[in-house]
Image: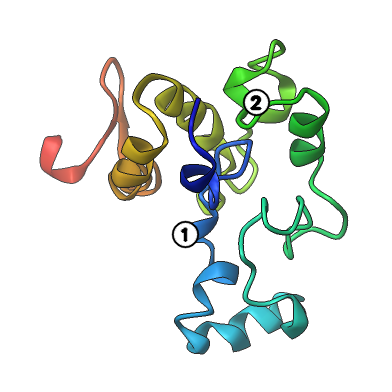
Amino acid sequence: MPVKDELALVSPCGIYCGDCACYKVKDNPALLPTLLTHGLKEEQLPCPGCRAVDGNCPHLEERCENYICAEKHQVELCHQCEDFPCPKLHPASDRANMLPHNLKMYSQCYIQRHGVQAWIDNLPQIKLRYFTGKISFGKGPQLPNEI
């Protein structure tokens, strides 16, 4: 079971809040105008992470359903749930090229096997492979230097 400090910026569903522009704006105020043009309110920023705001993510118009579900099932991370994997974590092709949603299942499995800190440490490489890798049948997403 991960310790609370490790989980501070990890959402129950497997998104790393520490990578979000709403969180990063605290150290990079240049992000603020872009965030405001996307409909976020300045008083919501910087976001301290979904756990600190009890699932009230600035990107959402209401409390996060994934957060509520984890709370209801009394788990810190979705992979600890008796219903894992569930449809809330199911990948979808809609906006997959720019949103990290499809990483949730992989992230949950990685965390379950290697732990939260190893996942955070490897997240830049995981996201690089996801967002820039090219699918090679039988090999999965390959980076250009691996093809």
Q: Position of residue 104 (x, y in %)?
A: 55, 34
**Is 124 left or right of 83, judged from the image as shown?**
left
Residue at 49% x, 72% y is 24
Residue bearing the label numbered 2: 90
Q: SS class of the residue under badge 2?
A: loop
Q: Residues within 10 Å of mark 1 (few under 14, many from 20)?
A: some
Q: Quadrant of residue 35?
A: bottom right
Q: Position of residue 97 (x, y in %)?
A: 50, 49
Q: Is residue 20 above or below residue 143?
A: below
The C terminus: image quadrant: top left
Q: Is residue 144 above or below residue 24?
A: above
**Is 30 left or right of 120, judged from the image as shown?**
right
- Amino acid under disc 1: Asp
**Is 8 left or right of 69, judged from the image as shown?**
left
Residue at 51% x, 49% y is 16
Q: Is residue 20 above or below residue 92?
A: below
Q: Residues within 10 Å of mark 2 (few under 14, many from 20)?
A: few
- Of discs 1 and 2, which sits in the foreground? 1
Q: Nearer the viewer, residue 111 or 8?
A: 8
> Label 1 vs label 2: CA separation?
21 Å
Which label belongs to residue 19? 1
Q: Nearer the viewer, residue 9 or 133?
A: 9
Q: SS class of the residue under badge 1?
A: helix
Q: Quadrant of residue 84?
A: top right
Q: Nearer the viewer, residue 124 or 90?
A: 124
